[in-house]
Image: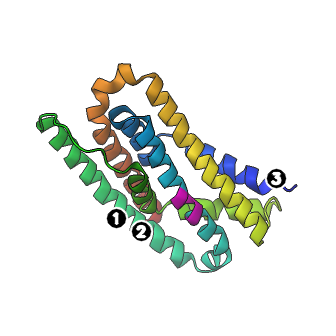
Amino acid sequence: MFFMPFLLGLVTSYVGSISPSMLNITATKISIEQGKKIAIQFAIGVSVIVLFQAFFALLFLQVIHENPIILESIETAAIVVFSILSLVFFRKARQEQQEISATKSKPNGFITGMGLSAINMFSIPFYCGAGAAFNMYDWLELDTIDVLLFTLGATLGTYLILYSYILFAEKIKSKIAQFSKYFNYILSAITGFVAVISLVKIL
């Protein structure tokens, strides 16, 4: 079926990213603190990087599976990055509580999204594993057309899940705006938890 690769990519990305994560919580935080427009820019930036990550994962699926050390290296690097991020978010949360609110220029949501998505190295092993499973069941061929369709689906799925979080944030903004200062603590906990779980998995 021609639509199958695209649908697989969309559903895999959306469902795989539905639980609270660094990117989802950040999209919520940006929507509440800086507005929906900046949050959407963030979601687009994240999605652009996912496009390359998913494409790379499927394109080099055979090579990666024949050389498990590549995946191990990516996962090890991700553990280091998420550990550092956990400390950065925690420090930022402490600083925000101590600072007096002041007018600040709004950052570029698109660049922020690309930056955070680029250091989310677990995307490559995730799409690599999903691609391998779908290929095993003959749902996905690793030819150019299927890889491109799956990649486009994954990109759209990522944008839609982030947009879902943004819409949710907009609806409850008045109720949770006062708690937004704690979002960095949440991000610190999430990134720290991911780092610990990943470390245990490797060991």
| Mark 2 vs 1: CB contact within 8 A | yes
Looking at this rendering, what residue extends furthest in the top direction?
A: 175
Residue situated in front as seen by the camera: 1 or 156: 156
Taking the image as shown, residue 16 lies to the left or right of residue 32, namely: right
Q: Is residue 10 visible?
A: yes
- In the rendered structure, find residue 80 and report the number of the disc placed on it: 1
Magenta segment includes 187: no
Q: Position of residue 87 (x, y in %)?
A: 25, 53
Q: Which residue is mark 3?
A: 3
Rounded to the nearest angstrom, the CA distance separating label 3 from label 1 is 38 Å
What is the span of residues highlighted in magenta in the rendered image? 48-52
Taking the image as shown, residue 73 lies to the left or right of residue 61, namely: left
SS for dot 3: loop
**Depicted 108 relative to depicted 74: above or below:** above
Q: Which residue is mark 2?
A: 76
Inspect the image, locate mark 1, and give the three-letter code of the amino acid beneath it. Answer: Val
The part of the image, by quadrant, that contains residue 174 is: top left
